[in-house]
Image (cartoon, helix red, strand yellow):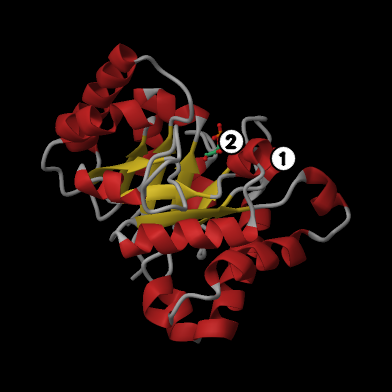
Amino acid sequence: MRQKIVAGNWKMNKTFQEGKALTSELVGMINDEVRGNVKVILCVPFPYLDTVRSLVGQSSRISVGAQNCSEHASGAYTGEVAASMLKSIEIPSVIIGHSERRQYFAEAGVLLAKKVDIALANGLTPIYCCGEPLEVRERNEHETLVRKQVEESLFHLSAEAIQQVVIAYEPVWAIGTGKTATAQQAQDMHAVIRQHLAGKYGKTVAETITILYGGSVNAGNANELFACPDVDGGLVGGASLKSREFTDIIKAMKA
Ligand code: 13P
């Protein structure tokens, strides 16, 4: 059985005080209401990581993730955060290659492969994001592009290493727009990604890899999206900033 995961990506939102309040509310609601084997990851801004991790405490369900890391090990890279720093404050996962990093910070293929490598070398789980802009889908080239994104940043990994990676499919046109992929569109692309992984690593390995859907997931559409056989959970932006709604999304993931 693949691990089911619902991750919240706070992006660059919330003050420290608001973030602490949200975390406390969430921990209470999740502990009270969520059952089954779904894991929750709160991907919060760097300055909040250590505090949010403390507030989460020794939960077996909830953990904390970063939203990015440097491709470099350490040194003179002002403003950057190393994977080893995340490890040293016991952060177990990191988002890599989010479409906003690709779009606004020109991150792509080889660079993202280096980030995946350094995350894995530090024992972190990379949550590797892929997904097509609207014009690519309109040209019907979305499957080709997403296969390429997966290939160029992940296919250098061994079969053992790829199984440490979580993949998130986030169509750019569905992020923060209120426009969600239909369950069928999500399932189709997740199946394409899994088949591509199977082609490279074999079916058994491909079947173990968690693939999340992201893009305007909310409490109203989560049930349908999460019911798709190849959708193993969600990477949630805006709706993860609201404790009631995010808890309801987590409860929609039957595991
Ligand atoms: P929204 O849920 O706000 O569309 O954001 C999705 C996302 O980018 C999660 O990483």
**Residue 109 % position (x, y):** 63, 60
Q: Dot 1 corresponds to which residue?
A: 173
Q: Which is more toward the observer, 202 or 49?
A: 49
Mark 1 or mark 2: name the one nearer the start of the chain: 1
Instruction: Answer left or right for 91 relative to 159.
Output: left
Q: Which mark is in front, 1 or 2?
A: 1
Residue at 25% across / 55% down in the picture? 37
SS state under label 1? helix
**Residue 204 % position (x, y):** 43, 84
Residue at 64% across / 45% down in the picture? 102
Q: Is residue 132 above or below residue 123?
A: above
Mark seen at residue 208 = none
Q: Which is more toward the observer, 151 or 24?
A: 151
Which amino acid does the dot numbered 1 rest on?
A: Trp
Question: Which image quadrant: the N terminus?
Answer: bottom left
Q: Residue furthest front?
A: 76
Q: Would the CB of label 2 be found within 8 Å of ligand 1?
A: yes
Q: Is residue 111 above or below residue 23?
A: below
Which amino acid does the dot numbered 2 rest on?
A: Ser
Q: Residue furthest bottom?
A: 202
Q: Dot 2 corresponds to which residue?
A: 216
Residue 166 seen in this snapshot: no
Residue 136 seen in this snapshot: yes
Instruction: Answer left or right for 164 relative to 231.
Output: left
Near mark 2 (Cα within 10 A), the count class, few <14, some 14-19 or many ≥20, is many
